[in-house]
Image: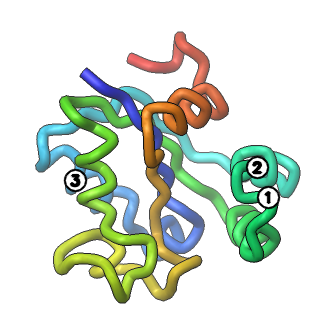
Amino acid sequence: MERTLAIVKPDGVKKNLIGEVIRRFEQKGLRIAALKMLNLSKDEAKGFYIVHKERPFYESLTSFMTEGPIVVMVVEGEHAIHKVREIMGATNPRDAAPKTIRADFASDIEHNIIHGSDSKESAAYEIPFFFSSIEIM
């Protein structure tokens, strides 16, 4: 059993896609182990995306993530990291496989509806960023 973090970004929340994202995860046999909606401050967004600090998109990404509420969730299941990444599709929606979340709903590479941990190491950092152990069922 593996856990990963997924975030419905501000554009996904604004487009009312929270339920659709969860539905797609559950249809693939994954379980939502924790869930909450919140607003990130600029400092919190910078802390979460610190691994991208030297990248040219860091400032715009962290600004975008503070534009409105986000939904963070812990997704659990066999090969959860790989499955979530597959369901999400490629970061750039133009490269995303058909019927993935990003292919179906994303506007562009930054406004791409959803974030998901890309490795066990990322999940180990990202899950406790948003959830304490008593919040995960």
Q: Mark 1 highlights which residue?
A: 53
Q: What residue type is labelled 2?
A: Ile
Residue labelled with disc 3: 23
Please give the name of the residue rendered at 23% of the width and 30% of the height, measured from the top-left corner.
77
Q: What element carries label 2?
A: helix
Looking at the image, tell me whether mark 3 or mark 2 is earlier in sequence order. 3
State the CA–CA distance, disc 1 to disc 3: 33 Å
Give the quarter of the image for residue 102: bottom left
Q: Residue 50 carries which label?
A: 2
Q: What element carries label 1?
A: loop
- Which of the two marks, 1 or 3, is nearer to us in this view? 1
Name the residue located 44 percent from the left edge and 32 percent from the top edge.
120
Count of numbered labels shown in the rendering: 3
**Mark 3 or mark 1, which is nearer the start of the sequence?**
3
Q: Split into 4 quadrants, where in the image is the N terminus?
A: top left
Give the side of residue 114 with respect to residue 42, left or right.
left
Q: Nearer the viewer, residue 125 or 36?
A: 125
Label 1 is placed on what type of residue?
Lys
- Circle 1 packing at 10 Å, graded few (<14), some (14-19), many (20+), is few
Q: Distance between the residues labelled 2 and 1?
A: 5 Å
Q: How crowded is mark 2: few (under 14 residues within 10 Å), some or many (20 or more)?
A: few
